Amino acid sequence: MAGEKTVLVVGGGISGITAALEAAEAGCKAVLVEKEPYLGGRVARMNKYFPKLCPPTCGLEINFRRLRRNPDITVHTLATVETITGSPGSYTATIKMLPRYVEDRAATSKCVDDCPVEIPNDFNYGMDKVQAVRLPYAMAYPMHLVADGDALKKAQGSPEFNAFVESCASKGIQINLDAKPETFQVTAASVVWATGWRPYDATKLDKLGFGKYPNVITNVMMERLASANGPTKGAILRPSDGRKVNNLAFVQCAGSRDENHLPYCSSICCLASLKQATYLRDYNPDAQAHIFYIDLRAHGRFEFFYDRVRNDEKILLTKGKIVHITEDPVTKDVILEGEDILSGSKIRRTFDMAVLATGMQPNTSLEKVPAPGVSYDEFGFVVSDEGIHATGVTKRPMDVGTCLQDATGAALKALQDTVGR
């Protein structure tokens, strides 16, 4: 029967890639479905990740090579699962795949540098703009161009757009704004759900100034600022004026451990801020970072990293709660107010920029698994594991290394659904 030795993996981040590879290399076929036009998820948008503190392309490129070489893995990007029916050993999934609006055999963004239409760059969390026809990022997999159909349709018919389309055609690139979504079905013995997470919406933290003051950013935005392929090519500069950051504040638990927002701890935000403080110090040795925390957590083997960072005399750690951020209207510096918990004194400090350490919210809190019988906890994490096997941050907050281990376990469970079938 078709699909009897197939594992459907939903989500092409580090967990989904790992689950698909492990299942396929153990003898099954794997179908990997990802809603973005590229694989890699949040990891692809980091500057460095634990435990090795290497760029994401280091680990991802190894996995992309494994994907390219394995004929038993089928990858669908710009695709979402609309429904899943059946039971362990026999599932049918209906998948909707959006068009890329561009057919590209050149596999290079240089061919479309003259695109006249720009859009906010989602890969960089909107901190810059990108052309509406583009390669998602330099190491994207698959290395295919993608186009924003809505943005291009608004420009359709203009002399600039017509000239661009003709230029593309001369290079073997076809723009097709009439392309339609496709719907198809996949049969599988098992399903691994690895749709990952989103950063908590910092605009809901109205007292902390995100979205109101340009020099208040989030921790995921800080990763892009420090990245060589980010909006500033790795230079840590203020969004308001492009000035080099010399005095940076990190506000921990921004919305986390708060019954009005995310009541739980995401477990890795402290480590992320410690890591990002080293980004600043490496980029600007004269700069000072100040981390305001409720409890500073460096779990397991990462204690050594915490010890290394706290011994840097220009990285200051204050046990305190920041409750209000405002802006100096002249300098655009940010003013942090709160309480120093250990001394009991009030905090009022001015910084070039502030980074809010927002927590990890599972995508399943907003986008449920389209199958019956899947249960969730009160925060939206998947807790059931009958046939549809959740993995990674779909289950609970995890660092990259833990996601890899958990995804391997999910692949093993999925393989058991195919045994004897």
Image (cartoon, rainbow, N blue to C red):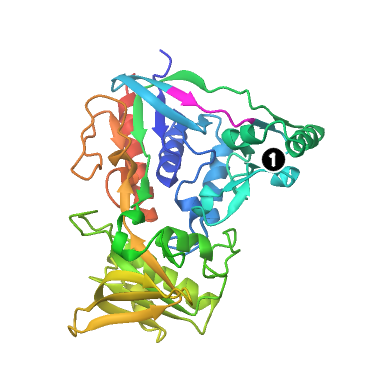
Asked whether residue 395 is drawn in magenta, I would say no
Q: Is residue 421 above or below residue 160?
A: above
x then y, percent, for residue 155:
66, 36
The part of the chain drawn in magenta is 95-101
- Above or below residue 170? Residue 86 is above
Residue highlighted by disc 1:
107
Judge left or right: residue 311 versus residue 110: left
Of residue 136 and residue 414, the one placed in the foreground of this image is 136
Residue drawn 66% across and 32% down? 102
Q: Residue at x 51, y 42 (%)?
A: 39
The percent position of residue 414, horizontal first and vertical second, equals 33, 32
Q: Is residue 99 magenta?
A: yes
The quarter of the picture where residue 410 lies is top left
Is residue 352 among what the camera can see? yes
Q: Position of residue 401 (x, y in %)?
A: 38, 55
Q: Residue furthest top?
A: 1
Quarter of the view holding residue 100: top right
The quarter of the image holding the N terminus is top left
Please tell me which residue is depicted at 34% across the width and 27% down the height of the picture.
Answer: 190
Q: Amino acid at mark 1?
A: Ala
Quarter of the image with the C terminus is top left
Q: Position of residue 358 (x, y in %)?
A: 33, 59
| Left or right: 108, with 313 as reference point | right
| 193 vs 125, nearest the viewer | 125
Say whether residue 50 is visible. no
